[in-house]
Image (cartoon, grey):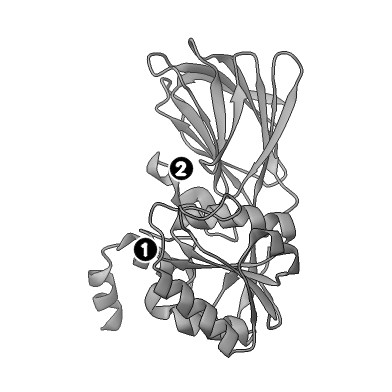
Amino acid sequence: MAAARTTSPRRVLVLEMNRALPPSTIRSPREPSSSQLDTVSKALVKHGVQVLRKRSQAKQAQAIVVLGGDGTILSAAEIAREYDIPLLGINTGHVGFLAQAEPAEMLDAIESLSEGDYTVEPRMTLAVSVRQPNGDISHGWALNEAALERRDRAHMAEISLGIDGHAVSSFGCDGLITATPTGSTAYAFSCGGPVMWPDTQAMLVVPVAAHALFTRPLVIGPHSRLEVQVQWCGDYPCEIWCDGRRSIPAPAGSTVSVSVAQRPVKLIRIGQMPFSARLVAKFELPVRGWRESKSH
């Protein structure tokens, strides 16, 4: 999915993260200060942009600005995807891999947004369905990952993994992560999965604490369909967690299907910093020696 340049938005939805606000807004334990929110709103107004503050106004918005960490941005992504609105994240959390700007860059980012000096980068999402033993089917989606997790901490889950209608492996595990390239730097990365560049067209499958020999992470094509049969999960049903926010029960006998969804999440990108540079900055990778050797 190639990034596309767009026009200056005239109406921007600014989402604030405050626990005291009603459920129509997004919450975060690390909320930005009111001064940061005021700064963003005033900067937008200064550039002739109408500021919207309620989720119910999302249909009117041409862009979303959200202040917070990755969890907060994932919350805002639910609105962005539902209404097909590009999203600009300003990091006030920890790593902020999904954010485009740090607080010190906030005003420059708002200026670029207001003047249309940005590109829209469609990010792959996953379509998730769970067919339960009684035939009921539940659906979900994820920007980062869909994670099969066990609730019974005393026992492993037993699962069978298939791709494109063919059995691949069966094993016991604590869980299974299916991630997008965007999510490859999140939960999947913590469980030993590789980092994929955001424009990679592929899905990542990472077993969690699997008790088997062939349980390496798999990178599968964007047109493939992953199927997971939940054989056994102890005294409690397993669950599918989408981005750690939305859950679907998956008791023993369920079949979980994951594929690339048709609708992406559109992230606003400002500047031309390559992903490799973002990777180094966010993870504080030790590259000093490499850079010194390249300069001589």
Q: Residues within 10 Å of mark 2 (few under 14, many from 20)?
A: many
The residue nearer to you, when weighing 47 against 38, is 38
Q: Quadrant of residue 192?
A: top left
In the displayed structure image, the side of residue 128 where residue 176 appears, left or right:
left
Q: Quadrant of the C terminus?
A: bottom left
Q: Residues within 10 Å of mark 1 (few under 14, many from 20)?
A: few
Outermost residue on the top side: it is 235
Res. 188 mark = 2
**Residue 237 visible:** yes
From mark 2 to mark 1, how far is it between C-alphas? 16 Å
Res. 58 mark = none
Q: Position of residue 267 (x, y in %)?
A: 60, 65
- Name the residue located 71 percent from the left edge and 82 percent from the top edge: 7
The answer to whether mark 2 and mark 1 are in CB contact below 8 A is no
The residue carrying mark 1 is 282
Element marked by disc 1: helix
Q: Position of residue 131 (x, y in %)?
A: 71, 23
Q: Position of residue 290 (x, y in %)?
A: 28, 70
The residue nearer to you, when weighing 211 against 114, is 114
The residue nearer to you, when weighing 41 against 215, is 41
Asked if residue 272 is positioned above or below residue 164 in the image, the reply reads below
Residue type at the position of mark 2: Ala
Q: Earlier in the sequence, mark 2 or mark 1?
A: 2
**Total marks in image:** 2
Element marked by disc 2: helix
Q: Quadrant of the N terminus?
A: bottom right
Asked if residue 89 is positioned above or below residue 227 in the image, the reply reads below
Q: Position of residue 72 (x, y in %)?
A: 49, 55
- Name the residue located 51 percent from the left edge and 14 percent from the top edge: 236
Residue type at the position of mark 1: Lys
- Name the residue located 62 percent from the left edge and 88 percent from the top edge: 115
